[in-house]
Image (tube, grey):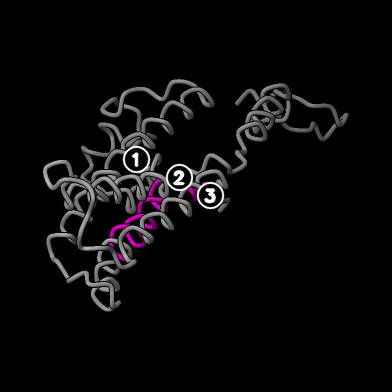
């Protein structure tokens, strides 16, 4: 798994900025009028939306692994843990469960957006690399089409995965073996006399085609 350093640097900057604003003591009297002050819950939603949005693209890995890491670190650890730390620190900021709710809403919104875009990006990259894969609901057995649905077998029993499962587990950095397989097929097609229908004559040692 590789790291996208521009996204990692942006995430650290946003995290430090959010910690400075949310965890340090603040003055009760503000010079900004109350009617011009932004809503606190809205700030929580926006902050965790951008934190999660940037963190999702830090690991250069599969879509499923990026989704799991983002939910574990941003949504659960930061979204809930930040409010617990805020309540423990002596910064005159009380614990508010609605702040946790706002954090979760912003984080889950970013996770859904990034996951959808990541899936679309992988589908376009696969089509550009391997050619058109056809419709998800087509009759192609390799894509889990009608052949797998009629037998009633799941992907573990039949060995066939749907397009969505292939996209979730596909790593764009992996080395494919399609060139080697195509080379083996071309070699077998170029040597027709090596098939099982030919045998060596016991008389002169030359290849003779079976007539039976």
Per the picture, the main secondary structure of the magenta-coloured stretch is helix
Mark 1 or 2 closer to N-term? 2
Q: Element type at marker 2?
A: loop
Q: x and y percent of residue 72 in the render?
A: 34, 62
Residue depicted at x 75% and y 25%: 208
Q: Nearer the viewer, mark 1 or mark 3?
A: 3
Q: Which residue is mark 2?
A: 57
Q: Is residue 73 magenta?
A: yes
- Residue 140 horizontal side relative to residue 209, left or right: left
Q: x and y percent of residue 16 in the render?
A: 43, 58
Which residue is at the front of the view, 22 or 162?
Answer: 22
- Are dots 1 and 2 in contact, CB under 8 Å? yes
Residues drawn in magenta = 58-77
Q: Is residue 162 above or below residue 15?
A: above
Q: Element type at marker 3?
A: helix
Q: x and y percent of residue 152 in the render?
A: 21, 45
Residue depicted at x 63% and y 34%: 181
Mark 1 or 3 closer to N-term? 3
Distance of mark 1 from mark 2, alpha carbons? Answer: 8 Å
């Amino acid at each position: 798994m590789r790291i996208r350093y521009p996204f990692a640097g942006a995430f650290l900057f946003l995290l430090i900025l959010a910690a400075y604003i949310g965890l340090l003591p603040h003055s009760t009297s503000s010079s900004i009028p109350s009617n011009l002050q932004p809503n606190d819950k809205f700030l929580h939603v926006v902050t965790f939306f951008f934190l999660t949005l940037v963190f999702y693209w830090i690991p250069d890995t599969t879509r499923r692994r990026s989704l799991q890491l983002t939910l574990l670190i941003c949504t659960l650890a930061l979204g809930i843990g930040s409010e617990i730390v805020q309540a423990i620190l002596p910064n005159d900021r009380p614990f508010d469960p609605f702040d946790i709710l706002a954090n979760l809403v912003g984080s889950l919104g970013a996770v859904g957006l990034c996951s959808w875009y990541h899936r679309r990006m992988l589908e376009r990259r696969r089509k550009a690399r391997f050619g058109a894969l056809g419709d998800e609901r087509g009759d192609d057995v390799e894509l889990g089409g009608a052949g797998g649905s009629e037998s009633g077998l799941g992907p573990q029993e039949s060995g066939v995965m749907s397009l969505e499962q292939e996209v979730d587990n596909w790593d764009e950095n992996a080395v494919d073996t399609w060139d080697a397989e195509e080379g083996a097929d071309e070699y077998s097609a170029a040597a027709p006399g090596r098939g099982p229908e030919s045998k060596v004559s016991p008389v002169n040692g030359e290849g003779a085609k079976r007539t039976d």
